[in-house]
Image (tube, rainbow, N blue to C red):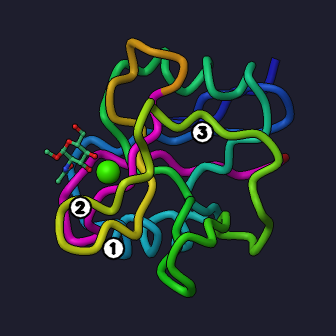
Amino acid sequence: RYIQQGWIYFNHSLYYVSSTENTWNDSREDCLQRGADLVIINSREEQNFIREFKTRTWIGLTDAEEEQTWKWVDGTTPTISFWDTGEPNNVIRDEDCGEIYFYEKENSWNDAPCDRKNVWICEKKI
Ligand code: 2F8
Ligand code: CA
């Protein structure tokens, strides 16, 4: 078993859950400084693993570059997605950043304003 202080292992990646809240950009910056990036969700198993932290959290998803074109922080387009019903809806001002909102539900992603403060989760592949 792979153990590293503050990081939790799942399926070839390590995950770090912040203990404070920050904007999406500052959250991403924190992850980069930890040699990681905001979490990228590639499977139902990973989505459900992240939900188990039971927190509203930023994920590494944004359409800041082009409205309605959602991209992961590694530049890829989601192959599988878990938007909540009616999301993404861009409802409050400009909602360009992805979060897990109602983690009780498998379909729990929401687009939220990037300057909102959230817990964040970093992922690094090992
Ligand atoms: O009901 C979904 C809706 O809830 C909030 O707006 C009232 C969210 N806003 C923020 O998180 C700021 C919306 O993004 C979300 O779509
Ligand atoms: Ca929304």
At 37% from the left edge and 75% from the top edge, which residue is drawn? 25
Residue named by callout 3: 15
Of the residues shown, which amino acid type is indicated by label 1? Asp
Of the pair 1 and 91, the residue shown nearer to us: 91
Of the pair 9 and 49, the residue shown nearer to us: 49
What span is colored magenta in the figure? 108-125
| For marks 3 and 1 on the same chain, the one whose residue lies earlier in the sequence | 3
Label 2 with label 1: CB-CB less than 8 Å:
yes
Of the residues shown, which amino acid type is indicated by label 3? Tyr
Q: CA distance from mark 2 to mark 1?
A: 6 Å
Tag 3 secondary structure:
strand
- The quadrant holding residue 80 is top right
| For marks 3 and 2 on the same chain, the one whose residue lies earlier in the sequence | 3
The dot on residue 26 is 1
Determine crowd level at label 2: few under 14, some 14-19, many 20+ residues with C-alpha closer than 10 A.
some
Indicate whether 119 appears above or below 116. above
Number of the front mark, 3 or 2: 2
Magenta stretch contains residue 117: yes
Residue named by callout 2: 22
At 56% from the left edge and 72% from the top edge, which residue is drawn? 32
